[in-house]
Image (cartoon, coloured by chain):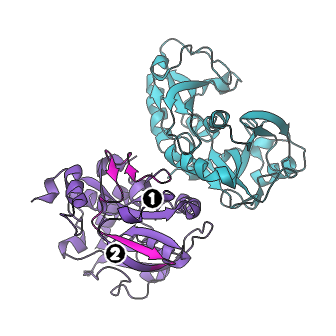
Chain colours: A cyan, B purple
Amino acid sequence: MNYAKMHPSAVRQLIREGKITGQTSGMCDGYAQGNLLVLPRSEAYDFLLFTQRNPKSCPILEVGDVGSRLVKRMADAGDIATEIPKYRVWENGVMTEECTDISHLWRDDFVYFLIGCSFSFEGELLAAGVPVRHIEEGRNVPMYMTNIECEPAGMFHGNLVVSMRPMPADQAIRAVSITASMPRVHGAPIHVGDPAEIGIRDIHTPDFGDSVTINKGEIPVFWCCGVTPQSVVMSAKPPLAISHAPGHMFITDVKNSLLKD
Amino acid sequence: MNYAKMHPSAVRQLIREGKITGQTSGMCDGYAQGNLLVLPRSEAYDFLLFTQRNPKSCPILEVGDVGSRLVKRMADAGDIATEIPKYRVWENGVMTEECTDISHLWRDDFVYFLIGCSFSFEGELLAAGVPVRHIEEGRNVPMYMTNIECEPAGMFHGNLVVSMRPMPADQAIRAVSITASMPRVHGAPIHVGDPAEIGIRDIHTPDFGDSVTINKGEIPVFWCCGVTPQSVVMSAKPPLAISHAPGHMFITDVKNSLLKD
């Protein structure tokens, strides 16, 4: 099946039925995908405040009501507990389980956070003629821990994780302008140029994802990354949290172009 | 003294010392002012989520840590409990007291919310040659209850309050463009034209503030209003809340121009 051309609700049904369990990259052309974090209500206030204080790394698409699995703003009646291909369960900051459905784990005090994802702006970059190296090379985007501390909030603290895309200067300028208009999916870059300035020792050895080719004359462009919340969960060690597995996202019914405001 | 030309920290000192107890409109040219809401931690999660779901009416400038009076992002060590000229105490949705200092009421479980204010974009409108009628006429801005329901969050619910500024169509277009770039102070208008469409029966009888002249050929332009949170507190009736008194704002150390992102 050509998942790229299917409507999100149809793909989410296949995910719900267990017929899709792989990564969602490239599915449902033009529709926004989201990162997931689920926390008990007792930790949810601190995390909601963390997202408010760190909007570039944790741009909120939707927060569920306490106990509710229903996605109603970003989807037409989506189910956050069954419509993501793969989940990760975290206990005290350590990943303890991967599963394809979290219905059996869901509790009345759970709150889900759906967070914007750079898949959205990559589509806009490509549409504007700005090539994205890791897509060209068929790899995962390179991601790095930085020396930039997130603004802490209650129990949550940790350093910013960034993703990197190398490009010539003229394309970098275009990429800044395009992504600046999409604050709900990380917005403008956080840094351009010397990786050492934000605490990255070796640009060819990313902390997450894959290394990509940087050609002569290209500069690295760094965006806040949706892996930051997971990294913060690993630092803050809440008793229980559930996330999506990397690359296995929630596909919303909302087009990327509507995330521009 | 010429308060318009003073630095916010100097004016806040006079407020702290009880030497200024009046409205802050026109003070500290170019610096952003903020609306206040204080809630106990037990109600703070629902309200924080309410602001996340209603960013145009409740654009957050800063949220304090639990129990902290310190304003550290929007001011250089501001004190939220003494540096506002007049406060209002609300019990079960009813205003029970006005006072010029809330030190004696402050509790370890209090959380403050500092919320963007239309004073900020009015300065930008004037600077761009868009006259603001209620300033010209020396009145308070006219404000109206609408039939637009805010997105509820937990215990908080209620209808949107809007402010209105009449202007010719060409200025309205300029005003949309200017305020659209200031999402942290209500952003672009929510409505232009027929008041009945958003449930306003009589444009000449505002629910809050004063009526202003609307000249032939002018259309009313409506923005989300910072009175919305107070109206929502009146609807939701939390046991205890504290707000600023209308027009008696917290003057930040941050210039309006920096609220554009």
Of residue B180 and residue A239, the one placed in the foreground of this image is A239
Of residue A235 and residue B42, the one placed in the foreground of this image is B42
In percent of width and height, residue A42 lies at 67, 53
In the displayed image of the protein, which residue is found farthest to the top? A216
For residue B60, side relative to residue B150 (left or right): left
Which image quadrant is residue B135 in? bottom left
Of the two numbered discs 2 and 1 on the same chain, state the one appearing first in sequence.
Answer: 2
Of residue A196 and residue A122, the one placed in the foreground of this image is A196
Say which amino acid is labelled 1: Phe
Q: Is residue A6 visible?
A: yes
Marks 1 and 2: in contact by CB < 8 Å?
A: no
The disc label shown at residue B1, or none: none
Q: Secondary structure at mark 1?
A: strand
In percent of width and height, residue A175 lies at 49, 33
Residue that appears at 41% across and 54% down: B184
Which residue is tagged 1?
Answer: B113
For the image, the number of numbered tags is 2
Q: Secondary structure at mark 2?
A: strand
Say which amino acid is labelled 2: Glu
Mark 2 belongs to chain: B
In the displayed image of the protein, which residue is found farthest to the front? B104
Residue that appears at 63% across and 18% down: A212
Looking at the rendered structure, whether the residues under marks 2 and 1 are on a common chain is answered as yes
Q: Is residue B225 visible?
A: no
Q: Is residue B89 above or below residue A31?
A: below
Query: From which residue to which does the magenta span run?
Result: B66-94
Which residue is tagged 2?
Answer: B98
